[in-house]
Image (cartoon, rainbow, N blue to C red):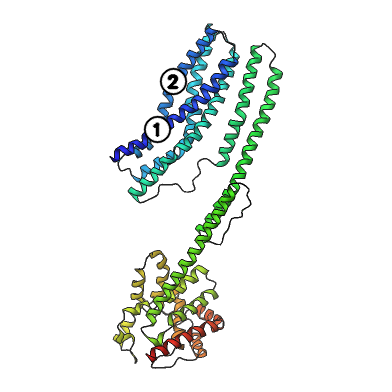
């Protein structure tokens, strides 16, 4: 059953393409070309019969050559549509070939199609004239060759646009089947095979200028047939045709530029949205259908911005909830993760980190002690001094925390947070844990969090001691520059500390309330 449906898709495409070919031939060759020959040139009945025979022979040869070339163009498409399980490479070749079919149609018509029609007809006409079978002037043969070029151009452009419409369903089939079989999209994002400018210029010249050229050619033949002097006519006709062609090309270029302008604006803004900038808005300065498109784009970006804000709030709440759950195990450390996050943010901004990196630094700070979930209460909550064995257990929490956060998906979002979680107890002189890293071997987040974590630990109350004054804690940080902590981040923290007073007071008040509530309980 599946093979039948695939073959049906291929046969449907073939029928449409053959229909396009016949329609283009009927309009251009039989309609325009036939009318030009038999209504413009005055011929005897014998000449008409001879010309008809030449046209039939040339047409048969053209159909044969077209069939061979068309079969070669369709080979990768046929393979992808008639094979039960095509490979990804087959899908890619077939998809690209289908996109190129309109261009290949133009190349076929203007190449093998036109040459296989024109050259045999030209040769047979010259042969018959020289043998006396045809009584037409040899000049007609040259004008007929020019006429076939003009007619072929009209046929090529007509088939180009008809083929573009016919291939849409096949392209959709390729993308759907490729996703189903290989889990990948076969589309070529951003690849431009024929630009709008080229389409408009081609259409303007072919549909705007070629009819005028055909009219001029027919008029010249009439003058030749009337035995009139044609030199003044051709001089005048050439000037008119050149000016008309230039005007048509200019009109196509202006139309393409007018259409391209909003498209270029949207392409630029879409790239900014793809990069995460949801503040962009397109300027609606258009009086046509592009106005609706611009408004739709702006509504879409507004919706993305609102959803991004909601997602960010959910992520922030998620990290804050994890930090609060950890702090709840020990009422005396309530608010610790939030305060360390505030300190780390201040250091990050002070040293000029980007907003994106500062946001990641904050998230890493909120989760820096998450590994303590894996530490037994009798060790974690012990009031007195820890034994060597107990301290060895505590020293495992950075590794445990990294392992926990590594399991959170998507892993690409969690990966930047891991170095801070694992390395916030490393020392600048290499005597820290868990890896004994020194200097700049310690990850950036680890060096920043070491300063923030140490300051909050020194200034926070514990069951066995009261937190030390801020000035003393800062003095200890300054004494430990270059030994325990990175000097640059100690200096940055000291410089930024005064700006944190208000936010820290609020965090400390929340911590006091949590301690009071826990004591009453």
Quarter of the image with the N terminus is: top left
In the picture as drawn, the residue positioned furthest to the left comes out as: 1
Instruction: From the image, tell me which residue sits under label 1.
Output: 14
Pair 2/1: label in front = 1
Confirm whether residue 442 shows in the render: no
The image shows residue 375 at horizontal and vertical percentages of: 31, 81
Question: Is residue 492 left or right of 414 when viewed as pictured?
Answer: right
Question: Is residue 345 left or right of 92 when viewed as pictured?
Answer: right
Q: Which mark is residue 448?
A: none
Question: Is residue 63 left or right of 492 when viewed as pictured?
Answer: left
Question: Is residue 290 left or right of 119 when viewed as pictured?
Answer: right
Instruction: Write the residue at 70% across / 17% down.
Output: 231
- Helix, strand or loop at mark 1: helix
Confirm whether residue 459 shows in the render: yes
The image shows residue 495 at horizontal and vertical percentages of: 56, 81
Above or below residue 135? Residue 356 is: below
Instruction: Write the residue at 53% across / 22% down.
Output: 31
* Disc 2: CA contacts within 10 A as few (<14), some (14-19) or many (>=20): some
- Disc 2 or 1, which lies upstream in sequence? 1
- Helix, strand or loop at mark 2: helix
The image shows residue 377 at horizontal and vertical percentages of: 31, 85
Instruction: From the image, tell me which residue sits under label 2.
Output: 61
Above or below residue 420? Residue 379 is: below
């Amino acid at each position: 059953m599946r093979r039948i449906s695939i073959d049906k898709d291929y046969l449907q495409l073939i029928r449409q393409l053959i229909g396009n070919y016949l329609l283009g031939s009927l309009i251009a060759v039989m309609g325009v070309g036939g009318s030009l020959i038999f209504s413009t040139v005055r011929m005897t009945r014998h000449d008409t019969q001879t010309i008809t025979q030449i046209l039939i022979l040339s047409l048969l040869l053209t159909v044969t050559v077209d069939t061979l070339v068309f079969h070669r163009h369709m080979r990768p498409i046929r393979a992808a549509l008639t094979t039960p399980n095509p490979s990804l490479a087959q899908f890619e070749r077939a998809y690209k070939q289908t996109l190129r079919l309109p261009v290949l149609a133009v190349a076929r018509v203007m190449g093998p199609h036109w040459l296989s029609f024109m050259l045999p007809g030209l040769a047979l006409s010259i042969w018959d004239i020289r043998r006396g079978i045809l009584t037409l002037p040899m000049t007609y043969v040259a004008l007929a060759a020019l006429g076939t070029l003009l007619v072929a151009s009209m046929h090529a452009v007509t088939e180009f646009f008809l083929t573009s419409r016919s291939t849409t369903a096949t392209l959709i089939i390729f993308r759907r089947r490729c996703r189903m079989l290989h889990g990948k999209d076969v589309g070529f994002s951003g690849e431009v095979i024929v630009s709008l400018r080229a389409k408009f210029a081609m259409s303007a010249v072919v549909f705007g200028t070629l009819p005028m050229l055909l009219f001029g050619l027919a008029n010249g033949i009439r003058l030749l047939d009337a035995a009139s002097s044609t030199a003044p006519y051709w001089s005048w006709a050439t000037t008119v045709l050149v000016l008309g062609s230039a005007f048509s090309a200019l009109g196509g270029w202006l139309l393409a530029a007018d259409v391209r302008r909003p498209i270029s604006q949207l392409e630029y803004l879409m790239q900014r949205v793809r990069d995460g900038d949801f503040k962009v808005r397109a300027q609606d300065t258009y009086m046509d259908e592009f106005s609706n498109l611009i408004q739709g784009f702006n509504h879409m970006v507004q919706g993305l911005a609102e959803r991004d804000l909601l997602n960010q709030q959910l992520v922030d709440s998620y990290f804050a909830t994890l930090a609060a759950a950890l702090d709840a195990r020990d009422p005396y450390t309530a608010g610790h993760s939030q305060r360390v996050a505030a300190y780390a943010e201040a250091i990050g901004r002070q040293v000029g980190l980007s907003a994106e990196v500062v946001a990641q630094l904050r998230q890493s700070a909120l989760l820096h002690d998450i590994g303590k979930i894996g530490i037994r209460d009798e060790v974690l909550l012990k009031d007195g001094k820890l034994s060597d064995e107990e301290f060895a257990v505590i020293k495992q929490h950075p590794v445990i925390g990294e392992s926990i956060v590594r399991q959170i998906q998507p892993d690409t979002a969690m990966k930047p947070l891991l170095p801070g979680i694992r390395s916030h107890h490393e020392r600048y002189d290499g005597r820290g844990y868990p890896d004994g890293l020194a200097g700049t071997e310690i990850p950036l987040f680890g060096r920043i969090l070491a300063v923030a974590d140490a300051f909050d630990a020194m200034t926070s109350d514990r069951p066995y001691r009261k937190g030390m004054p801020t000035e003393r804690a800062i003095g200890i940080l300054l004494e430990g520059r270059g030994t325990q902590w990175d000097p640059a981040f100690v200096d940055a923290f000291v410089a930024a500390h005064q700006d944190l007073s208000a936010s820290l007071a609020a965090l400390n008040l929340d911590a006091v309330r949590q301690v009071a509530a826990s004591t009453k309980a």
